[in-house]
Amino acid sequence: MKSCLKLTRKTILTVLLLGWATAATLRAAETKYEANWESLDKRICPEWFLDAKFGIFIHWGLYSVPGWGVKGQYAEWYWNRMEDKKQDNPWKQYHKRVWGENFQYADFAPLFRCENFDPKQWADVFVRSGAKYIVPTSKHHEGYAIWPSAEASKTWGRPWNSVEIGPKRDLLGDLGNACRERGLKYGFYYSLYEWYNPLWKSDRKKFVDEHLFPQFKDVVSRYKPAIIFSDGEWDMQSKDWKSEELLAWLFNESPCKEEVVINDRWGKDCRHKHGGYWTTEYAAGLKDGSHAWEESRGMGFSYGWNRIENIDDYKSARELIMVLIDLVSRGGNLLLDIGPTGDGRIPVIMQQRMIEIGNWLKVNGEAIYGTRYAGKASQWTEGKMPEQKFGEYMVKYTIMDQIGQKPKDGVAVKQAFFTKKPEALYVITPGWPGETLVINDIQVPRKTVVTMLGVDGNLKYKVKKDTLTIEVPQLTPEQAPCQYAYTFKVSGASLIVK
């Protein structure tokens, strides 16, 4: 009789949840958005994005053929940088020395063969990384499209997409099929402007009306993206891009109108003001989870593949895991970039970094996926608080300088990070915490259960006023559930935010 009662309750709860989800979907489908920011900004960020936490960015285009850039700069800007007329321009000097003075950027197109591209192998690595969504560049500022875009070839006056020249295949579609077969969300990056598009240079209004609008609608209608990362917006206001009109179409009429997530790069008046989630780039992210946000960065410095970056230019797996934990603790997502080569390979070091992150997430993913900002991101040690700088672009930020279990030269460090779900608080330590882990300013219910992810059994603990002391299991390195960072789950607990 008891088992029947449990089954009935479970069934009722399932029906209620399904009903709520269906009603929410219907409400979203019935909403009619007007072509103005006041209306568009009312659209709620789809929950899947808030739950996903970790995505893979892919910068892949003609710039992947030279695959070179001055260290500390973006290699995908190769064309723009080599056009600088200064005599001491290192980009121009490199291009002349390696490719020849008469070799034009367009000459890279037939060399972008992608002959070793295996979308299923890529998708397998992405799944093993623990990422939940994939964002390749459908076209970067060079304008070359990796799908059969008629507008690209028409306005450039030459074959300028991957089906007509180069690999002679629909790269965006082939990768999308492979990723979706493995259960990954799939979308794309789309640059609004194109550096040297003849129509952009001669008539920007015509470029928007006759190139951007039909091209954007084409790529959306073909591939039904779950996410769109817009960029290259900084030369004009959103009204000149007609972004409000474009997004009203996306939310009201496109085939992905319920699921699609967008960012905030739709005009030079938009970042951190309008659109969907806020973006930061090679920065510290934002302070909290009051608005959906995402930090994007590469493993080295460049987004596009840069052949002169060496092992010292790449972040270690440990540091990338710490970046992920830190961003998620503040309510954000990490969009980690890879730069494939012109022949279609993901560099092995990038594959290795992704898989190490995935190995950590196999054990600790419960404390990352589906979590929310806990009201406080971290617990600091004693010591002088370091200055915390936040911004949306190129903010110096080194997480490894900010973590530990003891102050560094009298400066406080983060000794624990927090995430939460309705039923539990997660405490993630950036390293082994020692014999005990002390959490301050925490409310713990009488019958709480404390566990360590990846370790069997409940842990002993003591509660004194607003302090929880956890007895950390004494494990050998071989017994440890993972490397780098460790998660303690406290059921029913919440932080006291002062």
Image: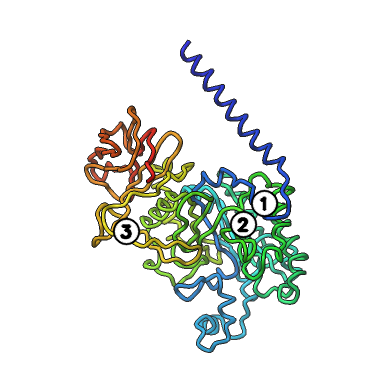
Task: Find numbered disc 2 in the image and state the secondary structure of the residue it sits on.
Answer: loop
For the question of whether residue 483 can be seen, the reply is no
Check if mark 3's residue and mark 2's residue have beta carbons within 8 Å: no
> Which residue bears the numbered disc 2?
274
Check if mark 1's residue and mark 2's residue have beta carbons within 8 Å: yes
> Which residue bears the numbered disc 1?
40
Q: Position of residue 425 (x, y in %)?
A: 39, 39
The residue nearer to you, when weighing 171 against 253, is 253
Task: Find numbered disc 1 in the image and state the secondary structure of the residue it sits on.
Answer: helix
Q: Position of residue 490 (x, y in %)?
A: 35, 36
In 3D space, how far apart are the residues under numbered discs 1 and 2 (Cα atoms)?
8 Å
The residue nearer to you, when weighing 268 against 125, is 268
Q: From this viewpoint, which residue is outermost toward the bottom?
A: 87
Mark 3 crowd level (few <14, some 14–19, many ≥20, 10 Å Cα) = some
Residue 475 occupies quadrant: top left
In 3D space, how far apart are the residues under numbered discs 3 and 2 (Cα atoms)?
33 Å
Mark number, residue 260? none
Q: Is residue 440 left or right of residue 359?
A: left
Disc 2 marks which amino acid?
Answer: His
Q: From this viewpoint, which residue is outermost toward the front?
A: 498
Mark number, residue 385? 3
How many dots with numbers?
Answer: 3
Look at 53% across and 65% down and name the residue there. 341
